[in-house]
Image (spheres, rainbow, N blue to C red):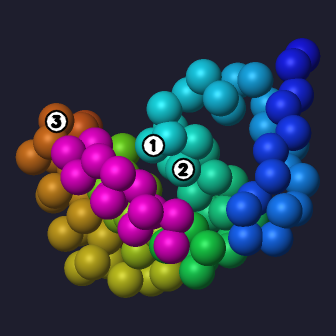
Amino acid sequence: MLHLLVFCFAGLSPVTVNETDVQKPAIEVTLEQAREAMSEKRWADAHGLLKDAKKQDKKNPEVYLLLGDLQAALNKPSMAKSYYKKAQKLGADVGERVAAL
């Protein structure tokens, strides 16, 4: 496995990047990080990552599915339905998610 050492320009802190992360589109890495944050119940982090993902690709249905999942986890069903509706317009299957609300 190839690891790259990257330095952030702000503080020159070393960051390890996996080879697989280098090959993935930025949106996929961001969504993966958001899923991880959600699984760890770091809701604010997940929300920030999903806002970033939305800026990267406004037409990616996975962004809206995850935003809906986040709102559902926060017990905000009307917001969740709104995001699921947007995901559905972009081609996602949201049937089970909406039925669970």
Kindly identify the residue that appears in the image at 41 percent across and 55 percent down. Answer: 53
Q: 40 above or below 7?
A: below
Q: Which residues are magenta?
A: 48-60
Residue linked to disc 2: 30
Q: Amino acid at mark 1?
A: Ile
Q: Marks 3 and 1: which is nearer the front?
A: 1
Q: Position of residue 81 (x, y in %)?
A: 23, 67
Q: Secondary structure at mark 3?
A: loop
Q: Secondary structure at mark 2?
A: helix
Residue linked to disc 3: 91
Callout 1: 10 Å neighbours few (<14), some, many (20+)? some
Q: 31 above or below 21?
A: below
Dot 2 and dot 3 residues touching (CB under 8 Å): no
- Estimate the spatial distance between the alpha carbons at disc 2 and disc 3, rounded to whole Å: 20 Å
Is 7 positioned to the left or the right of 14 in the image? left
Residue 56 highlighted magenta (yes or no): yes
Which quadrant would residue 54 be assigned to in this image? bottom left
Q: Position of residue 39 (x, y in %)?
A: 69, 59
